[in-house]
Image (tube, rainbow, N blue to C red):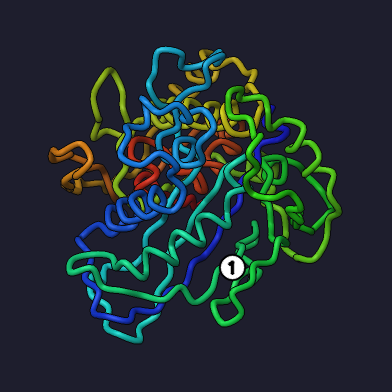
Amino acid sequence: MLKIFRMAKFRFTICAKDHIRFPAYKGSAFRGGFGYAFKRVVCVIKGKACDECLLKQKCIYSYIFETPPPEDTEMLRLYPKVPHPFVIEPPNTEKQSFEPGEEFAFHVILIGQAIDYLPYFIYTFTELGKQGIGQGRGKYDLIQVEGIGLGNEAVPIYQNTTQTLTNHYPIIHAHQMGINSQDTHNEVISQSNPPYQGGHQFNSPYRSTERSRRSQEETKGGVNAPQQDCSQENNHNNTITISLLTPLRLRFDGHITDKIEFHVLIRNLLRRISSLSYFHCGEKVEIDFKGLIEKARAVRQGASDIHWFDWKRYSTRQEEWMSLGGVTGTVSYEGDLSEFMLFLRLGEYVHVGKGTSFGLGRYSITV
């Protein structure tokens, strides 16, 4: 299970050139700006809707930002889109205004096959800085990009002073989170393949399996950090507290719920992680979903201090207002958590619920 699930986290540090003012939730500005800049960078056939485009099964923009299901998919066949292989985490501060010369950072998490397209993310955010972001389109410079390992160690991979990108950065594997091991090294993968080739295939979720297998066999080394050992958590903890860092939108019984029952959280995590694994890592998750959800029902909710954060954004593409409010605060759970810790830890990276590409559904766990 999740033998080849992999992801990478990157910290982008930018410096304001103009006054930049963000809305209350900055994720909308970063994700919206990225989408438009990304399409301008990579789109071949201008002015055509993606779902009507001849190249939609081969296009980087379509894969990253629209993410239609492959034609031969075994999952989510009736859905027009599947989970995007990226998460943008906006700056973790309540501050909305930044003056010229101020530096601040945001994070990008890439999952599976999308890791290969890191150069496009770097170039796109560089171009977005020239176009401007936020209210008034304040411009910025992308100063540097760092790869962030499992122990939060930072590996510099791009500097704007040299305009060069190293292909040597931490890759986080799911198996690092759930295996008792004396090995204290993250895997640092050298991505030797070009990020995009004309013959790259998107029409099967299993195309990336061989590449993922090869990546796991790359040489270890370079970054010293302890693996996150969920097995020890399983043995010694039956209580966790989850801090909801950005609005959480969990869907249950056809609507967004403001009650964070444990089984609802686990349902959403299982759905998201299994979809990301299938479509972007080339691995179908084979577990007893129904049995696991039944066990999740036995986990009790403890102390809770949550409230609703109301947020709306206007979608220029869809020409309508979108309600994207969700729950924030803290909630505790008590019970047998042993079978859930791996999924909960993965969720700290990939987020959970609706609107994850905006950075919604971000949380941290205290055990």
| Residue named by callout 1 | 146
For image coordinates 63% across by 30% down, the residue present is: 201
Residue 227, position as x, y percentages in the image: 71, 53
Residue drawn where x is 29% and y is 68% of the image: 132
Identify the image quadrant of the N terminus.
top right
Amino acid at pointer 1: Glu
Residue 341 picture location, percent across and down? 58, 38
Count the marks: 1
Rendered position, 87 above or below 30: above
* Up-down relation of residue 209 to residue 305 (above or below): above
Q: Which residue is located at x 56 percent, y 42 percent? A: 346
Binning the other alpha carbons within 10 Å of mark 1 as few (below 14), some (14 to 19) or many (20 upward) gives many
Figure check: 173 above or below 70: below
Q: Is residue 149 above or below residue 4?
A: below
Label 1 element class: strand
Image location (x, y in percent) of residue 111: 57, 43
Q: Is residue 198 left or right of residue 138?
A: right
Taking the spot 39% from the left edge, 42% from the top edge, the residue there is 356
Q: Seen in the image, is 312 located left or right of residue 156?
A: left
- 139 and 169: which one is in front? 139
Outermost residue, bottom direction?
Answer: 101
